[in-house]
Image (cartoon, grey):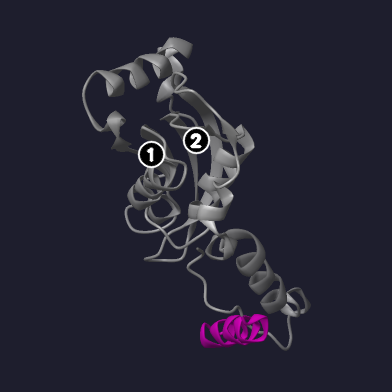
């Protein structure tokens, strides 16, 4: 099930308005700020933080029968996530693999699964573990693995302001947690283009 409480758009708009006033923004005199509380609240509730309203077990409930096929690998899934410590948006790229059990789901469902957890207040490390655990628990995958590379506004826009720094994290579950099958996952990833797997560029 989803982890959400009932959403309250009016309270969200009021909270944004109060925040702007608290930092001294001229809400009453600057026409560019007139509708900012409404815009920000709508963005948070319906885009960046709508993952709380996704029922993950239901998302993975439908699928087609499979007789234990080989590794399914989806590369370069881009997403945006929000840091729970400073509420700053960051961007990431994920490579997801799983060994199906009795069912497989469409590739678009895997993208939706990543977004369901990314569109919450979440650390990158937790995001990856949530995805692989969900594939094993709710899709009955034999194993799951994910590699994520993120560019964090917490690093680039504040603190040390390391604009070129990126964070690599991995997470594993089931039979892909160790041993030969995990090695096969990394071989499958690098078979595309080893130089591109962890390439450094302005966006993940």
Pinpoint residue 204: horizontal percent, then vertical percent.
Answer: 49, 35
Report the number of discs: 2
Q: Is residue 161 visible?
A: no
Measuring from the top left, give residue 41's x and y in whole percent: 65, 73
Tell me, yes or no, if residue 185 can be seen here.
yes
- Left-right relation of 17 to 125: right
Comes first in the chain, label 1 or label 2? 1
Q: Position of residue 102 (x, y in %)?
A: 47, 32
**Mostly what secondary structure, the magenta segment?**
helix
Local SS, label 1: loop
Residue farthest to the left?
Answer: 179
**Quick one: which residue is furthest to the right in this view?**
31
**Residue that carries the numbered disc 2 in the rendered image:** 204
Rendering coords of residue 158 (x, y %): 39, 58
Residue 85 against residue 31 in the figure, above or below: above
Using residue 60 as the reference point, say whether residue 47 is left or right of it: right
Residue visible at 33% across and 58% down in the picture: 159
Mark number displayed over residue 118: none
What residue do we see at 52% from left, 34% from top? 103
Q: Marks 1 and 2, how far apart in space? A: 8 Å
Which residue is at a point 44% across and 23% down the rendered structure image? 68
Confirm whether the magenta stretch covers residue 12: yes
**Decide: marks 1, 2 in contact (CB < 8 A)?**
yes
> For residue 166, which numbered disc appears in the image?
1
Q: Over which residues does the magenta segment extend?
A: 8-24
Q: Is residue 117 magenta?
A: no
Could you tell me which secondary element the residue under label 2 belongs to? loop
| Camera-side residue of 54 and 167 | 54
Mark 2: few, some, or many residues within 10 Å (few <14, many ≥20)? Answer: many
Q: Residue 47 versus residue 133: which sits nearer the camera?
A: 133
């Amino acid at each position: 099930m989803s982890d959400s409480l009932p959403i309250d758009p009016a309270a969200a708009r009021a909270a944004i308005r109060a925040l702007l006033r608290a930092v001294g923004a001229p809400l009453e005199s600057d026409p560019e700020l007139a509708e900012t509380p409404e815009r920000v609240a709508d963005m948070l509730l319906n885009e960046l933080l709508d993952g709380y309203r996704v029922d993950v077990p239901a998302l993975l409930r439908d699928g087609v029968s499979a007789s234990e096929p080989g590794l399914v690998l989806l590369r370069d899934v881009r997403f945006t996530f929000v840091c729970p410590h400073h509420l700053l948006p960051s961007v990431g790229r994920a490579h997801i693999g799983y060994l199906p059990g009795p069912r497989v789901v469409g590739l678009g469902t895997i993208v939706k699964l990543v977004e369901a957890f990314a569109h919450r207040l979440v650390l990158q490390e937790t995001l990856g573990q949530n995805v692989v655990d969900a594939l094993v628990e709710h899709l009955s995958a034999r194993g799951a693995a994910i590699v994520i590379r993120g560019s964090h506004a917490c690093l680039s826009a504040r603190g040390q302001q390391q604009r070129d720094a990126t964070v690599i994290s991995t997470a594993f579950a089931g039979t892909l947690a160790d041993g030969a099958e995990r090695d096969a996952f990394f071989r499958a990833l690098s078979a595309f283009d080893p130089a591109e797997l962890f390439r450094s560029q302005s966006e993940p």
